[in-house]
Image (cartoon, rainbow, N blue to C red):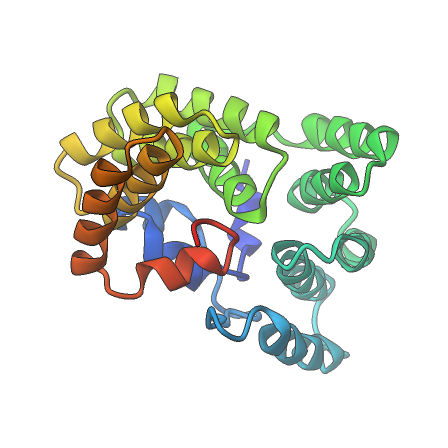
Amino acid sequence: MRSWYGYLAVAGAALALFMPMRAEAGLGVNYGYCSFLPKAHEGFARSIGRCELLVAQMQDELPEHRAAGYFSLAQLYHFDHQYDKAVENYTKAIGWRAQFPAALTARGDAYIALGKKDLAEQDHAKAAVLWHPSAADSLQLCWLRAMRGGPFDLALADCNIAVLAQPGDASALFSRCVVEYRMGSFAPAIADCDAAVKTGAKLAGALYVRGLAKRGAGDAAGGDADVHDAAAASPKIADGYALFGIGS
C-alpha cells in the first residue's frame, strides 16, 4: 500500500535540515504544495498565509490534489500548535479523500492536543483499518510527532518499531533521541543520540540534541561542548530547532 505520507509537503524542507540524507529520502516529500521553509524569527505565520492563498486557488484541481493541499495547510497549523485550525483543515482534506489515513492519524493527534480523547481514538482506529505502517512509515511518523510536539507516547512507540526493525540505524536512533529529550527522559536521549553519532552519520542534530539532553541531565560542560560542535557543523541549527520549540 502506498504511504499516504507521500502527501507531506509541509515542513519537508525543514525536516530535511535535521535528518540524515538517507532519512530525507524516506520522508516521501511532495514539494508541490506549501513547501515553504519558515524562518525561526518569523514563526509559521508567513508560511500559513502563503499556503492559505495556494489552497484558495485550487478550485479546478483533482479531489486528491485538493485533499493534499488542505492536508499541507493543516500540517502547518499543527506545527504552529493551532490545533483547532489544524483539525478544520484535516477535516476538509478527509472530505475530499475519505480514505486518507495520514490525515486521520494527524487529526487524531490534534484532537489529543485539544483534550478530545474520544475523537482522537475514533480517528486513530479508522486510520488503523486503512493503513498498516511499514518500519519506514513508523520512522517518519515518529519524527513528525517529535517535531509537532506530541503525542510523545505514540511517537516513542513509533520510534521503538523503527529501531527494532533497523538496529543501529542513525535516523531511527536520532528520532527516538529527540522524542526522549522532549519527554524529559534525558539519559535514554543521550544514549540514543550517542549511538546515532557513533554510526558515523553526518548528523549535527544528534550532537545538538545530545547537548541539550546533557544540559537537562545536569552536565552543563558536556552539553555546551556538544552544542558548540553542532553549531560549528551547522551554524543555524539552534534557530532551526527553536522553530519547533526545541532548545532555547
Say which residue appears at 50% left-offset and 72% top-offset: 36
Q: How far across and down, in percent of the image, does residue 9 sit?
A: 53, 61
Label tally? 0
Q: Residue 53 vs residue 194: left or right?
A: right
Say which residue appears at 43% left-offset and 50% top-offset: 247
Say which residue appears at 28% left-offset and 32% top-offset: 219
Q: How far across and down, in percent of the image, does residue 22 sit?
A: 27, 45
Depicted 32 relative to depicted 197: above or below:
below
Quadrant of image for the N terminus: top right
In front of the other: 221 or 187: 221
In front of the other: 220 or 226: 220
Say which residue appears at 63% left-offset and 34% top-offset: 151
Quadrant of image for the C terminus: bottom left
Q: How far across and down, in percent of the image, does residue 145 sit?
A: 56, 40
Depicted 26 relative to depicted 39: above or below:
above
Depicted 30 relative to depicted 144: above or below:
below
Is residue 92 something that shows in the picture?
Answer: yes
In front of the other: 122 or 223: 223
In this view, which residue lies farthest toward the top? 164
Q: How far across and down, in percent of the image, does residue 29 sit?
A: 46, 56
Q: Residue 228 vs residue 113: left or right?
A: left
Is residue 203 something that shows in the picture?
Answer: no
In front of the other: 225 or 243: 225
